[in-house]
Amino acid sequence: MKIAIDAMGGDNAPSAMSRAAVRAIKEFPDLTITLIGDEEKIRAELTDEKRINIVHTTEQIEDTDKPTTAVRRKKQASMVLAVNEVKEANANACISAGNTGALMTAGLFYIGRQKGISRPALSPMLPTRDGRGFLLLDVGANMEAKAEHLLQYAIIGEAICRKSIRSINLVLVF
């Protein structure tokens, strides 16, 4: 599996993302990670660069940026480039701890929706004591979800769980 990570999004970036990438490649032998962000800052945090690629950019989307405007204007932002890695089939998934609205917007603008899905759902994977974790679907981005959207979220969640690296549980929030 190939994952693109917005190394500049979220708190303690890029340090936290770089350290997490090193840990992940040690745990999952079939994983390749592309960290996207300030190359000099990322390299300063890497202790093991096997199966970790870096795409350099200094542009980033801030939490205070308006999502649609930021995605349209900051085409070289680390988050946008991470989403584009999926669009270009260089990655199977992307991760960002940055501006959630901008990530949703970038996903919709660059990748689009899957046929039959009218509204995407935020779906974080959360840890559990048994190590399996669970997928929590629709954690608040959609304030007025209809019954058809809830069904679509369940379909999305089931597909994610089926394709997951580990066996996980699914939780749908109503």
Image (tube, rainbow, N blue to C red):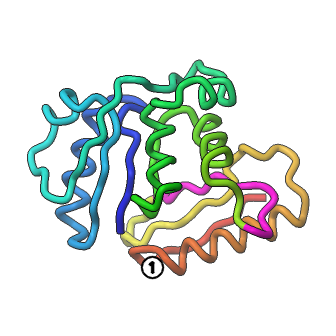
Residue kind at label 1, given as amino acid type: Ser
The residue wearing badge 1 is 167
Q: Is residue 100 left or right of residue 145?
A: left
Residue interval drawn in magenta: 115-126
The residue drawn where x is 29% and y is 34% is 56
Q: Is residue 130 above or below residue 173?
A: below
Magenta residue check for 125: yes
Horizontal and vertical percent for residue 93?
46, 59
Q: Is residue 67 left or right of residue 61?
A: right
Q: Is residue 137 left or right of residue 43?
A: right
The residue drawn where x is 78% and y is 55% is 119
Q: Is residue 54 above or below residue 128?
A: above
Q: Is residue 89 above or below residue 104?
A: below
Which of the two residues, 100 or 76, is positioned nearer the viewer here?
Answer: 76
Question: Which image quarter holds the N terminus?
Answer: bottom left
The residue drawn where x is 39% and y is 51% is 4
Question: Which image quarter holds the C terminus?
Answer: bottom right
Which of the two residues, 90 or 31, is positioned nearer the viewer here?
Answer: 90
Which of the two residues, 111 or 149, is positioned nearer the viewer here?
Answer: 111
Rate crowding at label 1 as few (under 14), some (14 to 19) or many (20 or more) other CA atoms within 10 Å.
few
Magenta residue check for 97: no
Q: Is residue 82 above or below residue 91?
A: above
Q: Residue furthest top?
A: 64
Horizontal and vertical percent for residue 113?
71, 58
Secondary structure beneath label 1:
loop
Q: Main secondary structure of the magenta part?
A: loop
